[in-house]
Amino acid sequence: MTTDFAASPAMPPGRPVRRRRRLLLRLLLGALALGLVAVLGLAGLATWLWSQADMSNVGQLRFANQLKIPPLLEPRLDGAGRKVFDLRLQAGTSELLAGRRTETWGANGAYLGPTIRAARGDRVVMNVRNELPEATTIHWHGMHLPAAADGGPHQPIQPATTWSPSWRIDQPAATLWYHPHLHERSEDHVYRGVAGLFLLEDPEANSLALPKDYGTDDIPVILQDKRFDEQGQLDFGEPAFSPIGRLGDQLLVNGTHDPHLTTRHQRVRFRLLNASTARSYHLGFADSRPFDLIATDGGLLEAPHRTTRVPLSPGERAEIVAVFQPGERVVLRSFQPNLGLGSLEGRFAGADDTFDVLQVRAGSELSGAPPVPDRLVVRQRLDQAEAVRTRRLELNGSSRINDQRMDLGRIDQAVTVDTTELWEVANRSGNPHNFHVHDVQFQLIDYAGRPPPPHLAGWKDTVFLPPSATVRLLARFAGYSDPELPYMFHCHLLRHEDNGMMGQFVVVGPGQAPAGPPARHGHQ
Ligand SMILES: [Cu+2]
């Protein structure tokens, strides 16, 4: 090094080597200082992002607003004795935050939609009129129905047109819901506000001593997180590094910000629906009082499960019954959800977030109600020995199943009608996912190698899958076959679904083949 230096003809006289060394030392120190500044800057940025990633409204609410209850949609009977429900999808403005008008979408109103209620055996007709500025769909989440009525990406409803599917309700009492499912647009349309409950009743459930007076002691709790910009409009941006899409820092319950519920009932049933696009919740009361979990996605459990917490990933439902004392106030809260992630990824996926959901204000006198029965329903058990086929589905990255992105023109699986199948679903990524199948309710054989815990032991249509977890489920594909029109299976974290983490299956008659690639009319 010094040799080269000494050889340089441009060197001034004197002590070039020492001067050169001094210069090098200064450069080195300068570089070190710059590096230190950069490292500190990055650390500062990382710390800032870290601190920003932790979201909570705990301690910030006054519970100032009475909880809104979505109205029940009254059907009319047509000449054939069918119950006809009219839904009108529309854009409008809503006062989601006090004093602000936010542009939103809804059904029969500017935000969310009415609660639909039907009973087992009813024949229903759903008239879905699209007054929105773009095509969308309405999918009946959790419903057993013909593929043509399913409302997936193959049934787009163009603006200013009406879609009128019809089917017969043929499944147990349950808390289902409806929401858009347009190809690549589900997250956007649900986030804007199109969603509602679809409650199913049956004689067996009605005969049980459970709170069932809608809006009185049977309370819908539709959970959605939102982010608002400075103008009070829905913010379509998202927090840095989120592996699951948009996460909001404000919570709405039935479209109500900062809500409370006044009750005159000692026992209250809450129908919890996670209608968020990405956020998982971990629900319980702030004082950790026990409550009874009585139902999950597909309906009542065989027996109530006494617990203090219930996890709920996007699309999932849970029904709980809680007991209140006269005059007390207690907060329903979402505690930090266990997403199965490390502390770094978890923080950016909402694992450190806590939200006060709803303050319950019990009146000074409460009308009593009998305790939740020890036994609820007798549930038919699907038998693993009857499974005619095992399918393995691997969730890869944040946009693929079995290494393929969703293609509306490709049928991924063909199932024979009136058979039971075993599906093995494996999360092979470092991201959290959940798995939803259309048309059926399923039963878990095992969850991450263990017997399913009580909250996953009943009928399910959506199940959370932390990284590396595998779940084995049984489903019976009864009744409806259609070699042309597929149903969907997908991740219900809607960004993942929109990115392609979805596949298609047809249910065919015995010996029948799929009718070939479906028309790609769902494409935009
Ligand atoms: Cu996912």
Image (cartoon, rainbow, N blue to C red):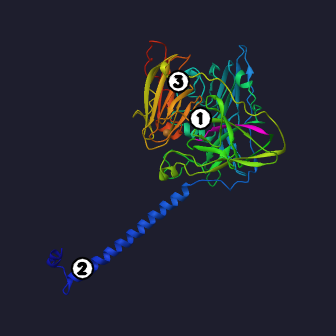
Task: Tell whether circle 2 marks a residue whose Cβ is less than 8 angstroms from ligand 1.
Answer: no
Query: What residue sits right under mark 3 in the picture?
Result: 475
Image coordinates for residue 478, horizontal then vertical, percent: 55, 18
Residue nearest the observer in this picture, 446 or 213:
446
Relative to 516, say whether 263 is above or below.
below
Q: How many marks?
A: 3
* The stretch drawn in magenta includes residue 4: no
Which of the two discs, 3 and 2, sits closer to the camera?
3
Which region of the structure is painted magenta? Answer: 266-276
Q: Residue furthest right?
A: 365
Task: Tell whether circle 1 marks a residue whose Cβ is less than 8 angstroms from ligand 1.
Answer: no
Earlier along the polypeptide chain: callout 3 or callout 2? 2
Q: Residue at x 52, y 26 (%)?
A: 154
Relative to 380, say whether 328 is above or below.
below
Residue nearest the observer in this picture, 38 or 372:
372
Q: Residue 216 vs residue 35: left or right?
A: right
Looking at numbered disc 1 in the image, what kind of residue is underneath it?
Pro
Marks 1 and 3 sit apart, C-alpha to C-alpha, by: 18 Å
Q: Residue 25 vs residue 511: left or right?
A: left
Marks 3 and 2 sit apart, C-alpha to C-alpha, by: 77 Å
- Where, quadrant-wise, is the N terminus in this rendering? bottom left
Q: Secondary structure at mark 1?
A: helix
